[in-house]
Amino acid sequence: MTGRSENLIRVWAGILLSALMFATGCRSHHVETTVENRTGTAIQLLEVDYPSASFGADGLADGADLHYRIQIQGTGGLKVQYTAPGGHHVQISGPNLSEGQQGGLEVVLLPGGMAEFHPHLNPGV
């Protein structure tokens, strides 16, 4: 084989390898998160903290849901806080989350400052 042919094969092999790595290696892991207010009353200043970020809403009516897509970076616990009627501040600790997890997470806020957590997550990296 001539030097020119060998170089052409190397160039095409590099392009093919780069395309294959791009197609299989660049993937974001997301968790579809739903917070359901089943407290029996509207809540204010809802905040959901998870490793490296947070999301929330100014208020959430009783029976309403908040949907948010998160990407977990790092490892740590989920925390939910909100203000109940009368100015009572509620803080609830949830499950530990790990970087790379994906799937779904349902947080059901209940009366009396309680919550249920229903994670449907695959293992992280």
Image: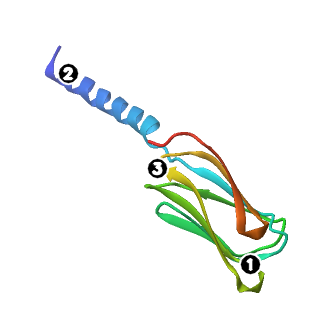
Determine the secondary structure under disc 3: loop
Along the line of sight, the residue nearer the viewer: 18 or 94? 94
Disc 3 versus disc 1: nearer the observer: 1
Q: Residue at x 62, y 56 (%)?
A: 69
Amino acid at dot 2? Glu
Q: Is residue 118 left or right of residue 29?
A: right
- Distance of label 3 from label 1 (alpha carbons): 31 Å
Q: Residue at x 20, y 21 (%)?
A: 6
Along the line of sight, the residue nearer the viewer: 30 or 22? 30
Residue sticking out furthest to the front: 112
Per the rendering, the mark at residue 6 is 2
- Distance of label 1 from label 2 (alpha carbons): 71 Å
Q: Is residue 52 left or right of residue 40?
A: left
Can residue 26 be seen from the camera position used here?
Answer: yes
The residue that disc 1 covers is 84
Find residue 18 and report its horizontal and vertical position in percent.
Answer: 35, 36
Per the rendering, the mark at residue 99 is 3
